[in-house]
Amino acid sequence: MTPFDTRLIPSGDIFIGGEWRRGRAATFASIYPADQSVNMEISTASAEDAKEAVEAADIAWRKPDWAGLKPHQRALILYRIADLITQRHEALAQLQRRDNGKPIAETRVLVASAAATFRYFAACLETLDDELTPSRGDYMTMSVHEPIGVIAAITPWNSPIASDAQKLAPALAAGNAVVLKPAEVTPLVSLALARICEEAGVPKGVLSVLPGKGSVIGDVLVRHPLVRKVSFTGGTDVGRGIARIAADKLMPVSLELGGKSPTIVFDDADLDHAVNGVLYGIFSSSGEACIAGSRLFVQRPVYAEFMKRLAEGARRLRVGDPSSTETQMGPLISAKHRESVERYVALGLEEGGRLLCGGERPVGEGREKGFFYQPTILEGLPNSARICQEEIFGPVLVAMPFDDEAALIRQANDSVFGLAAGIWTRDYKRAWRVARALEAGTVWINTYKLFSISTPFSGWKDSGMGREKGRLGIREYMQQKSLYWGLNDAPLPWAN
């Protein structure tokens, strides 16, 4: 039986400069992480393919049939993309499930999010204004925004279709051309999205999708002189490397990098809400999320009771077949990544941690064939422990008690990362005070891991730079120009 609708990707070709053809690099076998079966084999791009895509993009964005369109005309194409995603919602959700092993209930949400992202930025594009600036002489001044040019968009494997949309939609809305580099292990849904963009009317060359090795393709894209901006989501070390190259090129970048987000439970919190929220914040997506609430701080008077309920809740989570709507946690992305998670758990135990639940691979129901790992909670470690400081990117939570608010804020901020945080309390004044004191780009209060495309998202410290989402997200892919219109009746006096 075919594992997904082959009409989404009818061949192993990739999208280079607006043409479907074989890449020059080796073929790649896409693997389903739940049982290691082969989804399909596709070709991958070489360094030469990447250069061709960039050159085609540079030609395409300069033509009047894309950047030269009126904003409402580009918006119509973005609306079509959103409609086509919606029409193929279930097929795309199943493809995303096969691509990276996320449970089908989650991939359906991600596909709907991608459609909403294109629709939102289409609406923003139609209503985005330039401005007349206050005159300070015999002239009229105005500020306009124009496309940057060729954008390199590099996306991760944990939520491909949503991540792709969050970069493609605003970049295309702004009139740019985009070369999209999906993660090496999850190329399928990005190629399906390329077909949708082509069908919706995105002109030839404006979009390329280049599956393959990041060390090859990504390096070409970041260094190419015709690439004028890089938007990257991924690991902090790679992000630093991109930033160094960008500095030499004087090129803007948007970097959404790692996280080690604190979740804070005060003694006045609604514990039913907090238990469910903490479980969702760390164990949904199998913990493979940059904003996962992986450090838990619980106020000491409720620590014992809360941890008992939390561990019981973690043990009840359903880990298994991603095709089942009952499944809450699917497999990790690969054997190599699961081994990395296991090493961190072993390290935490060596550092003196106590295992409350998990810490092993599940057995039975065919799960031995996939890369599954149980939701894991440790306690008994200080915030300075490596397992509390380094991003694991898996279903591992480290819990620590705290006594007072000031000490809590010091510990929560004692991290090189600053991506997200969560607060659980009934005291709205405390929530405001602590939220403002936390060094993080996003803070959830009495909820966690909810997103809105209309709300800007960014990282602080080693979690990145630049902004995604929000009405002004389009501006991140534009450059500003000032125009002065002389209104003086007499010649400028200086040359008299």
Image (spheres, rainbow, N blue to C red):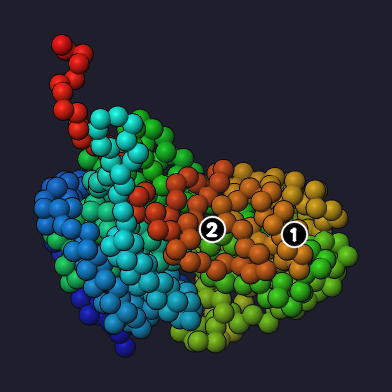
344 and 60: which is toward the camera: 60
Picture residue at 82% right of the left edge, 61% below the top: 299
Amino acid at the residue labelled 2? Cys
Q: Position of residue 109 (x, y in %)?
A: 45, 77
Residue 405 in sight from this viewpoint: yes
Outermost residue toward the right in this view: 301
Q: CA distance from mark 2 to mark 1?
A: 28 Å
Q: Does residue 39 lie above or below 253 as drawn? A: below
Picture residue at 46% right of the left edge, 40% below the top: 240
Amino acid at the residue labelled 1? Lys
Picture residue at 62% right of the left edge, 77% below the top: 362
Q: Nearer the viewer, mark 2 or mark 1?
A: 1
Q: Position of residue 104 (x, y in %)?
A: 45, 81
Query: Badge 2: how crowded within 10 Å, few (<14), some, or many (20+)?
Result: many
* Residue 56 falls left or right of residue 295: left
Kindly check if marks 2 and 1 are in contact, taking CB atoms under 8 A apart as contact.
Answer: no
Picture residue at 63% right of the left edge, 48% below the top: 439
Residue at which label 1 appears: 429
